[in-house]
Amino acid sequence: MASSATAVASPNIAFVKYWGNRRHELNIPTRPSLSMTLAAPLTSQTTVAFDSSLKADSLELDGTPVVGDGLARAKSVLDAVRQAAQLKSFASVSSANSFPAGTGIASSASGFAALASAAWSAAGLKWDEQKVSLVARLGSGSACRSIPGGFVIWNPGYRADGSDCFARSFAPPSHWPELRDLVVVLDDRHKAHGSNAAMQASAKTSPLYASFVMEGERRVGRVRRYLMGKDLSPLLQEVMEESDLFHAVCESSSPALHYLGDASKAVQRAVRDYNAEMRGTPAGYTFDAGPNAHIITRAEHVEELKSRIQKAASVKAFFVSAAGPGAKIV
Ligand code: PMV
């Protein structure tokens, strides 16, 4: 007997970052994080089929079989769903991204969010956003934030088993429809190191890690307040400070994690110059564990920023996204 379901999910961009775990095997983070779930055209679409005739779980990404760590992470999501549904069958999983994987556009977040959603539904379970978020977290921490739509907070929770460690939305996408994430792809090659091992190294070795953790909760409080008040300038100052602190943590880790290249720094300068000319902070950059920039701004600034950034750096692609609806069964 087989039963299948397909889900779509989008990446999310963290204004306050997740980097390091209190319990590594369960992706229970050391600090809260806050993100905006993005909208199409950036999506992962994943189909999960549970089939009692299968001898093992399998995973295919953009037509290529995935083994090793990627498959192991998919299995931890599938195992959690099987446990919730009291199901024994193995599953075949196929996933496709509308954007290049491994570019720092967090394809793992949208991929594992779509996988958790499709598996939940294929197993015959009734949709429960918090539970699907918990399950997505096991594949990739930040994936739990791509289950709810709009503006999202992921709290570490208190329970040792992570059962209160899920993400939830505090404002829908319609709260701030003019807000944009201008994604600047500077390098479309695969990342040199996976974020899971890297964040563990930072937690152990960066002298800045303790203050990064301590600052998390206060920063989430401020960013949430500025988002609710649509207070763009202080919001984007916080977003840039957080990105700078996150990369200082990475660079002060041993061995050092250098995610920002010359082109990333040129984009930072172009944003700072634009803000200086505008005598305010209409644009703010943030970078995840990769060289590509996310410029947060209002829709009216996007075209001017694109043309300035194109002059400052060699750009592989731009994507423009707004706040989106979260993971959906299709
Ligand atoms: O979910 P992971 O293991 O890919 O970690 C992602 C971490 C960052 O993207 C760098 C920050 C974040 O909060 O999304």
Image (spheres, helix red, strand yellow):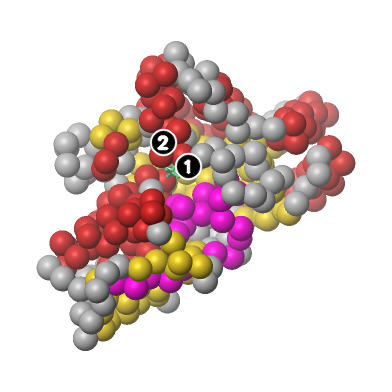
Is 169 within the magenta? no
Residue drawn at (16%, 62%), measured in percent from left and top? 84
Q: Which mark is residue 197?
A: 2
User: What is the three-letter code of the residue carrying label 2?
Assistant: Ala
The quarter of the picture where residue 74 lies is bottom left
Residue segment shown in magenta: 91-113
Would you place residue 64 above or below residue 190 in this image?
Answer: below
Mark 1 falls on what kind of element?
loop
Q: Which image quadrant is residue 200 in?
A: top left
* Magenta region includes residue 105: yes
The residue under the point 52% across, 71% down is 63
Residue 195 point in image, percent of width and height? 46, 39
Residue 258 left/right relative to 163: right
Q: In this view, does 314 lie to the left or right of 188?
A: right
Instruction: Say whether residue 149 is visible.
Output: no
Q: Give the farthest residue toward the bottom.
A: 1
Relative image position of residue 9 (x, y in whole percent): 46, 62
Which residue is found at the position 46% from the left and 48% from the top? 151
In the depicted view, which residue is nearer to us: 51 or 302?
Answer: 51
Visible residue check, residue 283 = yes
| Residue extending furthest toward the right | 311
- Callout 1: CB less than 8 Å from ligand 1: yes
Q: What element carries label 2?
A: helix
Marker count (numbered) = 2
Q: What amino acid is found at the position of numbered circle 1 in the picture? A: Gly
Disc 1 + disc 2, Cβ < 8 Å:
yes
- Please rate how many residues cluster around mark 1, counting C-alpha atoms within 10 Å: few if below 14, some from 14 to 19, many from 20: few
58 or 124, which is in the foreground? 58
Q: Circle 1 is placed at which residue position?
A: 194
